[in-house]
Amino acid sequence: MDSANPPNDMILLGLPLTRLDPTYMKSNLMHKSRYFRIVGFFLALLLAACSPAPTFKSTDISGVDWGSGDFELTAHTGQRMKAADFRSKVVIMFFGFTHCPDVCPPTMAKLAVLMQRLGDEAKRVQVLFVTVDPKNDTVKQLAGFVPQFNPSFIGLTGSDKEIAAVAAEYKVAYGQNPKNPALVDHSTGILIKDAKGKLRLLVKNDMPVDDLEHDVRLLLKEKN
């Protein structure tokens, strides 16, 4: 038999059987196995890249370069706290004041409902109420207001300068009401940061709790 021209039934993987000694076959199969693993890896990357981004009900502001810096304020417990203390949790921030007659109480109540709906997942979420009225919203005042909605909620206050700096970092506008000095006009949106501390969402305060829950659960599904 001419080994240089073997019949078709002696061809395997395009190679003459006369060359397929055990060592060669093992080496060839190992190369092919490695090849398929590499191809599989790149296919997985391609599929991941082509996967649609999560669709949020609120406004996705992931691309902004503000709102992710650290800050330090005083909690309603009297403890000084930093933004970095809440890393690994989805953080929901709302700026308001305890004597707010309209927007703040309903918004805080909605966030309380959200936490109830999240069940065990609520342990991975932290709600922060940042006052825009530091003169009147003392530690004691916040302690009598914020935890009433949910014991896990944290109220934050500080000096006028500290509050102004945090509000500026998160693009929150506020100021004394010109007609009633006892009131403070302020931005009413809710800001949400992911577990990495990145600002991700801007939520209108009148968004239904169903939609809010939808967005928070999407963030909770993301890998830290």
Image: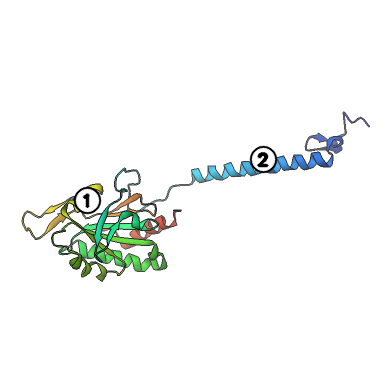
Quarter holding the N terminus is top right
In-image side of 146 versus 101 (left or right): right
The residue to which callout 2 is attached is: 35
Q: Is residue 89 visible?
A: yes
User: The disc labelled 1 sits on which kind of residue?
Assistant: Ala
Task: Name which quarter of the figure residue 186 lies in.
Answer: bottom left
Task: Name which quarter of the figure residue 213 lies in.
Answer: bottom left
Closer to the eye: label 2 or 1: 1
Q: Nearer the viewer, residue 213 or 81?
A: 81
Residue 100 in the image: state x and y as whole percent: 16, 62
The residue to which callout 1 is attached is: 167
Residue 75 in the image: state x and y as whole percent: 25, 62
Task: Name which quarter of the figure residue 89 lies in.
Answer: bottom left
Badge 2 crowding class, 10 Å Cα cut-off, few under 14, some 14 to 19, many 20 or more, is few
Tell me the number on the disc at residue 142: none
Residue 128 in the image: state x and y as whole percent: 28, 60
